[in-house]
Image (cartoon, grey):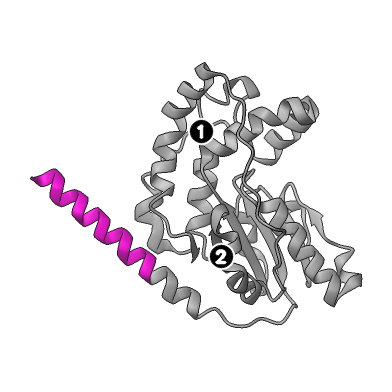
Amino acid sequence: MIDFIDKRIDKWKRSVRKRVAIRRLERIPQNAPKNCVIVASNGRSGSTLTFLALAEALKEVDPVSANKVDFVARLSDTEFYAPCVYKTHDFPQPLSTWPENTRVVFCFGPTKDSAFSVFSAKERYGADWIDQHFYHLHATGTFDELFERDVLQQAKQIKEWITFEDVPVLCVRYDALWDHQETISRFTGLEFTPPKRRERTPKDIPEEFKTSADRLYDPIDEVIDQLPECFIASAQYKSVVDKLPVTD
């Protein structure tokens, strides 16, 4: 009986969080394209297509500034320029000192899908790409440990971005990017027109790795599933992301 009540309470809390998230989105002001826009993600979650679409939008309104769009491995090594569009897989803390016209679109998605994508990327892009990707995500282990522990710190990154309030952060689930084009445009001040949506190609993952991945990433993704699909980062989601099994 107690377990049933707990589940009902948890379902009610998730419903309330989603309604609050929608109301917060409605209060996003229309911004002029004079922001420094940063596209962040836990990796393989739509950040590249979002970055390219916003970079193209900046090119349309300010071709000179569009020359400064770039991937940034470490935000602490980057100077603020506005307008501009950056992409990163870094953690948010360095942005605490950035001006108020910083805008972040944080793309997130299932950590298991991301890990499968990284696994298959080794064959497509090679070992050097893997090394760079692991550096970009502050990896705490090697490629061989990808299905043994959260070496890419995806849970930690999602936890920190979801609750970061020092600059405005719009969190958007990968599958919802196409459904929230107007919101992203209004938030960034740039016309967000993503490419036509395509279904992701299933990854060929050996069965033994799938079993390990289920055990490792399913508990993380179950927590992520409790978050709304599009919302402003806020401490109100701390009670959700505190459940994430963050490892060092």
Q: Amino acid at mark 1?
A: Asp
Q: Which residue is mark 2?
A: 179
Q: In which quadrant of the rendered image does the N terminus lie?
A: top left
Q: Position of residue 150 (x, y in %)?
A: 52, 32
Q: Position of residue 63 (x, y in %)?
A: 90, 71
Q: Amino acid at mark 2?
A: Asp
> What distance separates the C-alpha of mark 1 from that of mark 2?
35 Å
Is 190 placed above or below 6 here? below
Residue lying at 45% horizontally and 64% vertically, measured from the top left: 234
Q: Which residue is mark 1?
A: 248
Considering every residue shown, the one lying at the far top of the view is: 208
Horizontal relation, residue 77 to residue 39: left or right = right
Q: Nearer the viewer, residue 72 or 22?
A: 22
- Is residue 216 in view? yes
- Is residue 139 in view? no
Q: Position of residue 96 (x, y in %)?
A: 60, 62
10 Å crowding of disc 2: few (<14), some (14-19), many (20+): few
Kindly check if marks 1 and 2 are in contact, taking CB atoms under 8 A apart as contact.
no
Is 204 placed above or below 183 here? above
Residue lying at 52% horizontally and 19% vertically, measured from the top left: 207
The boundaries of the magenta stretch are 1-19
